[in-house]
């Protein structure tokens, strides 16, 4: 049985290897020494992946699925050690929808990728023409990921890729390499050598991966700016791309909603992972009639949620993962305050507190054009905007150039679905926000990216469609 220390030892930089000390965002204490891989290391990883891939593809779906199910079991066996490392490196608490939840999701998504059926499709069979559509492996897939849900998003990228017969080279965020290295080490105990590797490095190595001629597809989750660079880097070899570029999700509370009944759902929709979630609720639009009630109920729920060091079992909110993100949140809340908006809760970080803690913040009576509304805060600060007609709310919700998720809050499901259909977003939830499910396709509209993840669509996105006609 692997201990936390032995897991950390097996992924840490070797003596003499380039390394970087990773600091706990809650305490500033060192978590471990991450290797810093070079472009040469990337070349070796891609060569090993290309060498391992044909035999993996030749195994067929059933054997590959069996290996992925074993990998899910392995993740569960090491779940507590993985959650501890994730909590220290990313900052998220063990409890609440955080570190233990994320590791559990890794096992769930591995199993879903392993068990989702994908049979060849008879497109035409009329006696004269016979055409069958199936999916061939792409080859070597590059997976570039962020620091907010580093393990879960890596699994979202690698599980369907492996199931479809590909090898994968992962480039995790330079902020959270240890979590991804540990996850891959656990999974690799169940996979052939070289098939899955992690190159722990920064943007330059990521950019090389995105342009490398041996990479057939890039799975990317991160900022819109990096997504645009990846489109350019990948153009030389016409790589396939799935891009999940975050968003600035709106939630619309209709006038017939019950503020008390929805307050906890609204809170977690916005503050899951301390707001550092691509499809979190980032702008809340509330009808005039119930505006004060929603503000009051939400403040009650938010004020009761403990924030602190992730390893303390009592906490459900943690620090921002990095100082850069803390500075963005602080700047946007100050812009709101300067405009005369009303701070209902939070907004005053304690300068003496170690770590990147920004308090849970709710901001009312804020103009729709304020930067805290118009820009993605990606942290624990939610603007609450007043509206008087549903058309006005829809216009404001759609008035940004991204569209990952959105939500409508109302007991009248028929009315809520009608409003949902008018929103420019890849997913619109009703009476919840951000609830992803491995059976249900997920992807963005507008500049939130393109391509679908999860479900059978997610598997198809990791194959090359081939028609056999005859
Ligand atoms: O992301 P980057 P950052 C948002 C959030 C945050 C902002 C910036 O608003 O404030 O993005 O975060 C790699 N070629 N999201 O700077 O830079 C990089 O090394 C190839 C939303 O951390 O996009 C890392 O592995 N790779 C998001 C990954 O891309 C490149 C989650 C993400 O880094 C690259 C996180 C390049 N040119 C932040 N440039 C979400 N969708 O949920 C960067 N990388």
Image (tube, grey):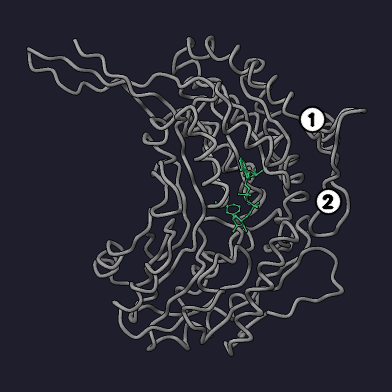
- Classify 462 as above or below 48: below
Secondary structure beneath label 2: strand
Q: Going by the picture, which residue comes out furthest to the right?
A: 15
Task: Give the residue at x 84% y 41%.
Answer: 20
Task: Give the residue at x 37% y 63%.
Answer: 430
Q: Residues within 10 Å of mark 2 (few under 14, many from 20)?
A: many
How far apart are the two marked residues, 1 and 2, measured between alpha carbons?
23 Å
From the viewer's side, name the closer residue of 53 and 88: 53
Question: Is label 1 in contact with label 2 (beta carbons under 8 Å)?
Answer: no
Left or right: 397 in relation to 55: left
Q: Residue 17: which quarter of the image? A: top right
- Classify 413 as above or below 449: below
Left or right: 387 in relation to 127: right
Left or right: 200 in relation to 64: right
Residue hosting label 1: 2
From the viewer's side, name the closer residue of 111 and 11: 11
Tell me the tag on residue 23: 2
Tell me the tag on residue 164: none
Task: Give the residue at x 86% y 44%.
Answer: 21
Is any atom of residue 108 visible in this view? no
From the viewer's side, name the closer residue of 50 and 25: 50
Secondary structure beneath label 1: loop
Q: Residues within 10 Å of mark 1 (few under 14, many from 20)?
A: few
Across and down, in percent, residue 368 comes to 46, 79
Across and down, in percent, residue 69 comes to 54, 26
- Quadrant (top left, top right, bottom left, bottom right) of the C terminus: top left
Across and down, in percent, residue 32 comes to 85, 42
Q: Is mark 2 within 8 Å of ligand 1?
A: no
Is any atom of residue 403 visible in this view? yes
């Amino acid at each position: 049985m692997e201990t936390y220390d032995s897991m950390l030892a097996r992924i840490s930089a070797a003596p003499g290897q380039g390394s970087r000390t990773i600091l706990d965002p809650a305490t500033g204490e060192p978590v471990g020494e991450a290797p810093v891989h070079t472009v040469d290391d990337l070349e070796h990883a891609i060569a090993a992946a290309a060498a391992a891939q044909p035999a993996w593809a030749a195994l067929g779906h059933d054997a590959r699925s069996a290996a992925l199910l074993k990998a899910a079991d392995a993740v569960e066996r090491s779940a507590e050690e993985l959650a501890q490392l994730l909590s220290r490196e990313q900052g998220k608490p063990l409890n609440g929808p955080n570190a233990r939840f994320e590791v559990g999701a890794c096992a769930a998504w591995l199993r879903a990728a392993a068990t989702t059926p994908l049979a060849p499709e008879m497109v035409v069979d009329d006696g004269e023409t016979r055409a069958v559509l199936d999916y061939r492996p792409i080859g070597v897939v590059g997976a570039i990921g962020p620091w907010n849900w580093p393990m879960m998003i890596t699994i979202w990228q690698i599980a369907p890729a492996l199931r479809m017969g590909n090898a994968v080279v992962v480039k995790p965020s330079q902020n959270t390499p240890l979590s991804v290295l540990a996850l891959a080490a656990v999974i690799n105990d169940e996979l052939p050598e070289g098939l899955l590797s992690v190159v722990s490095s920064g943007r330059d190595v990521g950019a090389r991966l995105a342009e490398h001629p041996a990479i057939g597809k890039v799975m990317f989750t991160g900022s819109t700016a990096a997504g645009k660079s990846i489109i350019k880097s990948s153009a030389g070899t016409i790589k396939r791309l799935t891009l999940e570029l975050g968003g600035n999700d709106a939630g619309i509370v209709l006038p017939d909603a019950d503020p008390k009944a929805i307050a906890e759902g609204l809170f977690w929709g916005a503050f899951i992972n301390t707001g550092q979630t691509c499809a979190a609720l980032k702008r809340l639009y509330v009808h005039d009639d119930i505006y004060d009630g929603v503000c009051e109920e939400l403040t009650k729920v938010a004020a009761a949620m403990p924030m602190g060091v992730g390893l303390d079992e009592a906490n459900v909110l943690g620090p921002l993962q990095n100082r850069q993100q803390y500075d963005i949140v602080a700047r946007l809340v100050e812009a709101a305050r300067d405009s005369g908006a009303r701070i209902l809760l939070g907004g005053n970080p304690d300068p003496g507190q170690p770590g990147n803690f920004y308090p849970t913040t709710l901001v009312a009576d804020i103009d729709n054009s304020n930067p805290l509304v118009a820009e993605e805060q990606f942290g624990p600060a939610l603007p609450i905007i007043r509206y008087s007609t549903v058309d006005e709310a829809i216009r404001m919700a759609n008035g940004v150039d991204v569209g990952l998720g959105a939500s409508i809050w109302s007991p009248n499901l028929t009315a809520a679905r009608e409003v949902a259909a008018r929103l420019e977003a890849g997913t619109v939830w009703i009476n919840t926000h951000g609830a992803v499910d491995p059976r249900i396709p997920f992807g963005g509209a507008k500049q939130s990216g393109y391509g679908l993840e999860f479900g059978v669509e997610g598997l198809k996105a990791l194959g090359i469609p081939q028609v056999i006609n005859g």
